[in-house]
Amino acid sequence: MNYLNRHIRTTFILPSLIFVIAMMIVPILYTSYLSLHVWSGSARRAPEFVGLSNYERLFTRDPRFGDAVARTFIFTGVAVGAELLLGLGIALLINGKFLGHNVVKTLILLPMVATPVAIGMAWLLLYEPNIGALNALLRALSLPPQDFLGNSTTALLWLAVVDIWQWTPLMALILLAGLAALPEEPYEAARVDGASTWQRFTKLTLPLLFPTIIAATLLRSIDALKTFDIIYTMTRGGPGFATETINTYGYIQAFEYFQLGQASSLLIVFFTLILGVSLFFIRFRRRWGTAL
Amino acid sequence: MSKRLVFKMFSLALAAAFALAALLPITSLTAQDNPLTAGVSNKFAGTELRLIFANHPWNNTIQRLIPDFEKASGMSLRIESYFEDQLSQKLQVGLTSGTSTADAFMFRPLQEGRLFAKNGWLFDLKAFAEAEKDWNWEDFQEAARGTVTFEGVVFGVPIVTERQVVYYRKDLFAAKGLSAPTTLEELEAAAKALNDPANGVFGIVMRGQRAAAVTQFSSFLYSFGADWTKEDGSSGLDTPEARAAYEFYGRLLREYGPQGTTNMSWPQAVAVLQQGKAAMWIDADSLFLNATDPTRSTVAAEIGFAPFPAGPAGARQYNITSWALGINELSENKEAAWEFVKWATSAPVVMALQKSGNPGPRISVWESPEGLSGFPTEYAEVAKLQSTRGVGYDRPRVISVGRARDIVGAPIVVAIEGGNLEAALKEAHEQFNAFLKEDR
């Protein structure tokens, strides 16, 4: 007891310290270790050390990797961009009190609480080109039916649509919280000065909301970069490799090809990328968030 | 064991008993005079075996017979079932970490066999198989035995064999005065003649998903006179024959197939046939119940079967062992597990399974009229004809099959989409060669 009392500061942080070490530090170190080896996952065949050759292969001899990186960022850019615009629109629309505002706010959150795999399955049925609901609708409107996920050039965008459908509510929710926290006084002053609605939006709301926008974009971007469920359930990276992102490629390397070393090197690169994106946003916010 | 689980198992057992009662008119058979369990020993009575199966018709049928085995052997079996891809991953993760407690499992020898054998996950059954004279290893088709043997190790016992066939709509063919295609040229002509998208019927449907399509494309490749690899073991994708095969397969689906084939494996493809939206479906014959079972298919009564059509190099369809039973090297009940495997692959059980529509590996069963009685007549003729010919593999024979399938499957998608096939094949050829050098 005395020992604990004397070391009370370290004792209190110990549980979280153990958690961070066990659940984050150790896996990262183990993944780094594996990324320098070739291993097919057998307990009877030890990993074989190969130095940096897994990385060398990713950057010089593996066209799938470069394409997957590009696709990951395209997917994230399209999805998060659209989510931000739509989310901001929705947040402005349902901000404040109106009849049934609680019902509307609850309804709008529904896509977010559904399971991604179930969402993927449901959208797969909607997108089904021969008997799916979307093409039935297009035909009813005398529009040409679409191939949706069957077409290499557009499949990624149709996947982004699903992500947008699911995650716009989160964006709206965060921005709504940001809007609710804005001070009233500047708006009153602006009104007295005769500022138009548009001016109040661009000169007051946007700058005041900017830190929230950055935070929301950061959260969603990290999540969107990691998107796996809907891509894997809906296209498994296909047609061909047209919707393969870093995450699905890593999964395939690890659990279908059983190249655990190669998969680890890929994940380390991915980890570095996400870390980079996060640092960029955090810096960006620190430098510009308050100045604007 | 929780109450709910007990209740679930009880109701399962009850359902199985009813199904069994329907299957066997005489339910009062004792263990000794039940022909299905004649040779089963009860020296492992009390052992609980854990088995992992795929969701496959073979599994559905054997589950009805298992109570007999449990009664005769005194063992109890715990069975888990998964869709084939989940099964593969479940096994690999379990076996990798050494945590899998499964004693025996279903696996695909052509897909995972060499990897599992290389990693030492499969117990060598050679001694067991050769010691059991009554069970008769020699009665298994030679190709089937070859598929489960790698570097002298027998790593599994074949349970399901399959060949590629043409499923066609007899009514649609008759309406146009067409007969079943015997050559690939006739196949294309029929697909063209019957393709009527305006009325919601497409000429043909097949798999087009990158890796899934590889096996069904293989018969086309062989029939055009090409193969995955050349005799020296290097990639065979740069030959004009291979190119013609890719081009042909892609053209069929592009011109006469439904939309979205590039995302189709067999469940999606057969759904199009089941709904009466395709005139032909080319896939494994072991899946025939999906087409001919009236509870699943709206056109069940109209389905005809034809052997794989002849290409420039003849009719060289695949004829493979698609599933086998293996015993976990880490199992503590290897001998008890073998008792089960031996029973499940014994001649009377294979006969019962084949009569319920599961094409098996035993020569004696194929040769007896009783063994063909469970199939539609036309199917039985086609399957019997094709069981004696063809190529014993439907995908590249390598250790990392998944990787190889993704490489050789990529040009299929390009061909279906009508993209630059020449460039895609060139790239696939180079990658496949690089892969083959590494795949040791």
Image (cartoon, helix red, strand yellow):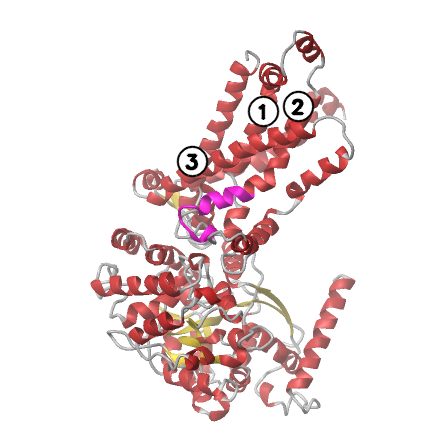
Q: Label 1 crowding class (10 Å Cα cut-off): few <14, some 14-19, many 20+? A: many
The circle on residue A269 is: 3
Provide the residue span drawn in magenta. A146-162
Residue annotated with mark 1: A213
Instruction: Decide if residue B391 is on the left or right side of residue B171.
Output: left
Q: Amino acid at mark 3?
A: Val
Q: Is residue A228 above or below residue B223?
A: above
Who comes first in sequence, dot 1 or dot 2?
2
SS for dot 2 = helix
- Answer with mark 1 or mark 3, whichever residue precedes in sequence: 1
Name the residue at 78% across, 63% down. Answer: B3
Q: Nearer the viewer, mark 3 or mark 2?
A: 2
Is disc 3 placed on a helix, strand or loop? Answer: helix
Name the residue: 49% across, 57% down.
A129
- Residue behind mark 2: A178
**Which kind of residue does numbered mark 2 sit on?**
Gly
**Residue B285 placement: quadrant:** bottom left
Specify few, some or many for label 3: CA neighbours under 10 Å numbering under 14, 14-19, or 20 or more: some
**Marks 1 & 2, CB-CB < 8 Å contact:** yes
**A246 or B193, which is in the foreground?**
B193
Q: CA distance from mark 1 to mark 2?
A: 8 Å
